[in-house]
Amino acid sequence: DSGVTQTPKHLITATGQRVTLRCSPRSGDLSVYWYQQSLDQGLQFLIQYYNGEERAKGNILERFSAQQFPDLHSELNLSSLELGDSALYFCASSDTDRGQGNIQYFGAGTRLSVL
Amino acid sequence: GQNIDQPTEMTATEGAIVQINCTYQTSGFNGLFWYQQHAGEAPTFLSYNVLDGLEEKGRFSSFLSRSKGYSYLLLKELQMKDSASYLCAVRDTSYIPTFGRGTSLIVHP
């Protein structure tokens, strides 16, 4: 168990809908990262938050947004869902956003199926 | 941007040794990671290299050559539970690692 908690584990929804994925980082970790993993794309970085502020952005679609709350948990919002959004969404956390020893620890993921 | 290349699939026998290679091209190298991922599960951290040389951790070792843009993960005394995908990830000065597509390792009896 990495200590990173993601809910829900599975999500089934329809095209055009909106969903929210939740992540609680390891105790003491200030950084949260969101990744998307699909069969043909591998693990793709979406966005990073550090202590409540957006720190880095990857290949995140405009239909997707995220935030990190004062208690450091994070939510990833996916809207106007398309079939191609079906994937595993992982959250990872680390204690800092810089530093040589900065290691990311991953949650168990949310499997999103858009029908 | 970064370019990471690792074999798609490898097979090995239980009890044997296997070496999974990773080559990369990046501007501003700032560390290389190896993760293990069983199907449908979370990636699990295995090793981190930032300086040239070999890092050993039990049955797993990881090697880095920065001048060659090359790393390998060495798994000894293979067990059936080692069947998984192994992800090489390279970090640049943005401190965000870029992951390779992963190498699917199949260990057979």
Image (cartoon, rainbow, N blue to C red):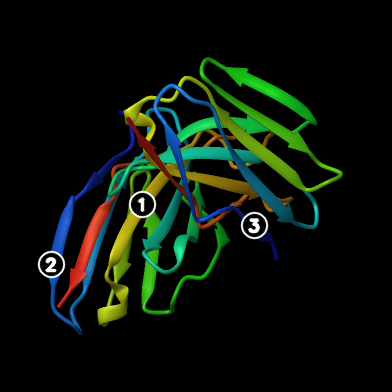
Q: Are marks 1 and 3 on the same chain?
A: no
Tell which subunit mark 3 falls on.
Answer: B
Foreground mark, 2 or 3? 3
Residue farthest toward the right in the current orientation of the protein = B67
Question: Mark 3 packing: few (<14 Cα in 10 Å), some, or many (20+)?
Answer: some
Write down the residue under mark 3: B4
| Residue A101 visible, this orientation | no
Tell which subunit mark 1 falls on.
Answer: A
| Amino acid type shown at disc 2 | Ile
Quadrant hosting residue A80: bottom left
Is residue A12 rendered to the left or right of residue A39?
left
* SS at mark 1 in the image: strand
Nearer to the camera, B33 or B12: B12
| Amino acid type shown at disc 1 | Phe
Q: Are marks 2 and 3 in contact (CB under 8 Å)?
A: no
**Residue at x 30%, y 28% (from the top left corner):** A1
Residue A12 is tagged as: 2
**Residue at x 36%, y 52% (from the top left corner):** A90
Residue A90 is tagged as: 1
Q: Quadrant of the C terminus of chain A?
A: bottom left
Q: Are marks 1 and 3 in contact (CB under 8 Å)?
A: no
